Amino acid sequence: MTNAGTDLFGIALNELGNVLARVDESRIDSACAMLAGARKIAVYGCGREALQVKGFAMRLYHLGLPVSVVGDMTTPPLGSGDVFLVSSGPGETSTVLTLMQIAREAGATILLLTAQGESSAARLADLSLLIPAQTMANDQGSEKTSVLPMGSVFEGALFVLFEVMVLKLRDLTGQSPETMRARHANME
């Protein structure tokens, strides 16, 4: 049993590495510049993607960036100069498409993280970060490419991608690990 588990870890980590190696670094840099220059940032994701997006929002806050999570009561309205960061692995989630349209009509810039570069969401976005991973859109039959279930490889790739983006944003914003740490919650 132990060897089988170890093999599964190796396979899963290899899958994540292969996905992340195919993400366009110049687009990551463009996304980081977009976030660093935003007047306000609002983030959104559905399901397990939402967990990754909320974790990234926390780090954006630690960086001193003006971020909120759509759905929280304290989320301000978006407008010109603002960025709506949204994750939709399959790229066809109805809630995501509706929120993207609202953000577009308000004048915000839309940054999308998706596995489907030809999706409806990708067509609405100002900038898409393509994460070429299995999602619930292609997790069955001959399209299945991951040992992990459903959209897990996409969600795992989001976590690692967001952490690398935090490092890039830390440099862009001139923050130190100490200033980030000073913004960490003390009410835990």
Image (cartoon, helix red, strand yellow):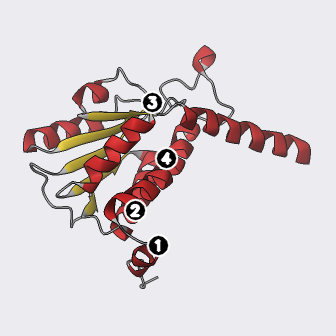
Q: CA distance from mark 1 to mark 2?
A: 8 Å
Type of amino acid under label 4: Leu
Q: Nearer the viewer, mark 1 or mark 4?
A: 1
User: In this view of the protein, which residue sits in the foreground, 27 or 58?
Assistant: 27
Instruction: Assess whether mark 2 and mark 1 are in contact (beta carbons under 8 angstroms).
Output: yes
Write down the residue under mark 1.
Answer: 177
Q: Is residue 24 above or below residue 175?
A: above
- Whichever of labels 2 and 3 marks the residue nearer the N terminus, that label is 3
- Whichever of labels 2 and 4 marks the residue nearer the N terminus, that label is 4
Write down the residue under mark 2.
Answer: 170
- Whichever of labels 1 and 2 marks the residue nearer the N terminus, that label is 2
Q: Quadrant of the N terminus?
A: top right
User: In this view of the protein, which residue sits in the foreground, 28 or 15?
Assistant: 28
Write down the residue under mark 4.
Answer: 161
Q: Nearer the viewer, mark 2 or mark 3?
A: 2
Write down the residue under mark 3.
Answer: 115
The location of residue 159, given as percent across then percent down, is 51, 50
Type of amino acid under label 1: Pro
The location of residue 168, given as percent across then percent down, is 42, 54
Q: Residue at x 37, y 36 (%)?
A: 27
Residue at disc 4, secondary structure = helix
